[in-house]
Image: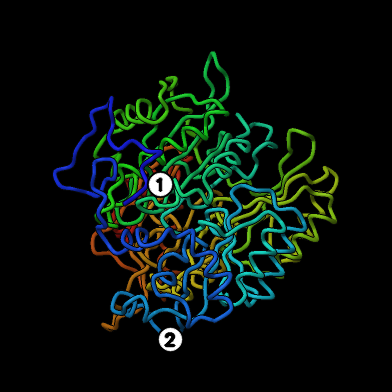
Amino acid sequence: MPDLRFKPTAAQNTEIPRPKRAEGQWALGYTEPLNKNEQSKKDDDPLHVRDRILYTYSRRGFDSIDPADLRGRFRWMGLYTQRAPGFDGGKTAQLEEEELDDRFFMMRVRTDGQVLDGEALRALGELSTTYARNTADITDRNNIQYHWIEIESVPAIWERLESVGLTTLEACGDSPRPFLGSPVAGIAKDEIIDGTEALDEIKRRVLGNPDFSNLPRKFKTALTGHPSHDVAPEVNDVSFVGTVHPEHGPGFDLWVGGGLSTNPMLAHKLGVWIPLDQVADAWEGVAGIFRDYGYRRLRSKARLKFLLADWGKEKFREVLENEYLHRTLVDNPSPAVPVSQGDHIGIHEQKDGRFYVGAAPVVGRIDGTTLSALGDLVDAYGARGARLTAYQKLVVIGVPADRTEALADDLETIGLTARPSNWRRSTMACTGIEFCKLAIVDTKERARRLVTELEKRFPDLDTDISVNVNGCPNACARTQVADIGLKGQLVMDDDGNQVEGFQVHLGGGLALGANFGRKLRAHKVTSAGLDDYVSAVVSAYLADRTDGERFAAWVARADEALLRGEPVTV
């Protein structure tokens, strides 16, 4: 039975919508385990697995690991078994999870908007080269992601991470996943409000707290006080977005219920004003509603977005105010939406006269050698450190004004660039079949080759076009909200062979005109034909666009033949 001591067993002052069938909502009395995941969490708090890793599994080896820990509770420690080699995409849905397990782990290190100083960057680099075969990807949730981790190495890795203020705790699992924070918090000249203090307070209250470690599923948080909305707030479960009240001044609007995957939904904007010192309270309230009223019967419906879809934002706000915050939120129009969200690439002046330099790897793929070298550059240039971004990029902050160009030059020597092409700047890719057990196709290497080819074919592109490449329908790389979103699947080539390919989403985006990309009926592209297809669509756009017309706007009106990459005869 879940511990409801700190939660309402049923709302006393608010009428709660009841679904037509029991959906596993704790606060309505449906506490029985309804699927294997809920049973596993009932059997043992996943936070307890840390001690078993430290004192049993790391000493006795991989074969000693309880399967319920291996494929379940390990996630609360930021660990997934990675995909064993030799299984093509056709096996992904055919084999059981344990058949795809390798004896190595992916490990996710959360940074939560933290500034990584030189020591922290070198620690991340050393862990990569020592324990992870020099792998280290920057994800689109401010994480560093390692591969090839052995269970015997985990205690030493944790000890080193903790020495520089980092952790893998609850980086995965049905828990508060790593937080997205603005990479320019506290330094940007045009920032509305610095939310660092609030994000730190949320982390202090909830990470490792059993009151929030058993949620119906993952729970994604974003917070930014920057007017460019640089943390993709529309597609997170809970987002705090900087705003200004005419009387009270700077604060945060509250957005809830966003998410992608197979049922994409944009967040509902509550249109409120929350002061900095009450953000953590509001977070606890939103997470508490999800914990207590979220749908636990089916994993496919166990996200906050489904509760919002059923309740509506007015009812959600009513429950939040009456049953969790016990106060009324201040009304305030939601903030203006930027034309596009900020990625902070390039050289920009800070409010203190120093500069920050945003740099891009290729689709987030770096390595331990690069991280260590970046740590050395941070110290050599007297910079404060680096933050990771929501777009698989990084920002070096606190650079002296007279050293920015020299730093940009030196970043080039370690495989990063502050002067990227559109294609390198605006392309993301998930982990893909190389390591992920859910993936169907290769993504990282395929996206890298695509970037290289598009740079050759369109070297002087004068507009932004984003390309997001995903290995399966789960949209970890935000497939549906890119100009060109590519969802991996098996397709038939011209000779009738089943090969790697993509379903295409066109014209999606966040910020101004936020929407999901247009899917063309029965249209698929082979991986081998991807370069030519994207080139054909981009060429058609450049030839057919009106003055100042953005790619997404063109997609909305373009002839379908152009979107299919076919020539149009007049």
In the rendered structure, the answer to whether residue 378 lies left or right of residue 249 reads: right
Which numbered disc, 1 or 2, marks the residue that appears first in the sequence? 2
Q: 465 or 175, which is in the foreground? A: 175
Q: Is residue 292 above or below residue 437?
A: above
Please give the label number shown on residue 334. none
Which numbered disc, 1 or 2, marks the residue closer to the eye?
2
**Which residue occupies 79% across, 49% down?**
383
Label 1 sits on residue: 552
The amino acid type found where label 1 is placed reads Ala
Q: 517 or 564, which is in the foreground? A: 517
**Which residue occupies 50% across, 48% down?**
209
Res 518 seen here: yes
Tell me if mark 1 has few (under 14), some (14-19) or many (20+) residues whose alpha carbon lies within 10 angstroms of its own: many
Res 496 → quadrant: bottom left
In the rendered structure, the answer to whether residue 420 lies left or right of residue 433 reads: right
Q: Position of residue 334 (x, y in %)?
A: 44, 27
Q: Position of residue 369 (x, y in %)?
A: 72, 70
Label 2 sits on residue: 86
The amino acid type found where label 2 is placed reads Gly
Q: CA distance from mark 1 to mark 2?
A: 39 Å
**Pointers 1 and 2 in contact (C-beta within 8 Å):** no
